[in-house]
Amino acid sequence: MSPIQLISFSSHVSKSPLETFVACAHQMLDPATPEPVRRAMEPRLLAQLPALRALGVFELFELRDPALRAWLGDELAELTSVPLR
């Protein structure tokens, strides 16, 4: 089953932030993914960043796709610049 089918037809939400992140990233990087679906994946993927950062995922692994790496690098930089309340 492709990541598109997995997310589109799944009756339950992924069990972990990492599963959600990987499924969304695969879907966003798949050239066959329609643009509206890709845009719908963006907020789901971004919502996983705080948990993945807290787990140290981005200290252990590097994203291979340059565009995705740059975009998420910018998003992670914004997360770290927001003061805690």
Image (cartoon, grey):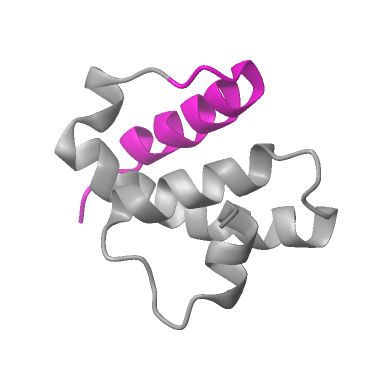
Whole-percent x, y for residue 62 in the image: 39, 17
Nearest the eye: 66 or 77: 66
Vertical side of 45 occupied by 7: above or below: below
Residue at 35% across, 52% down:
19
Q: Who is closer to the viewer here, 75 or 1? A: 1
Residue at 70% from the left image edge and 40% from the top image edge: 30
Q: Residue furthest left?
A: 55
Q: Position of residue 13 (x, y in %)?
A: 39, 73
Is 28 a magenta residue?
Answer: no
Viewed as shown, does residue 71 lie left or right of 62? right
Residue at x-position 35% and y-position 42%: 82
User: Which range is magenta?
Assistant: 63-85
Q: Is residue 73 above or below residue 35?
A: above
Q: Is residue 80 magenta?
A: yes
**Percent from the top left, x then y, of residue 12?**
39, 79
Which of the 4 quarters of the picture holds residue 16? Answer: bottom left
Q: Is residue 7 left or right of residue 53?
A: right
Q: Residue at x 57, y 42 (%)?
A: 26
Q: Mainly helix, strand or loop, the magenta region?
A: helix
Quadrant holding the C terminus: bottom left
| Viewer-proximal residue among 71 and 25 | 25
Image height check: is 67 above or below 79?
above
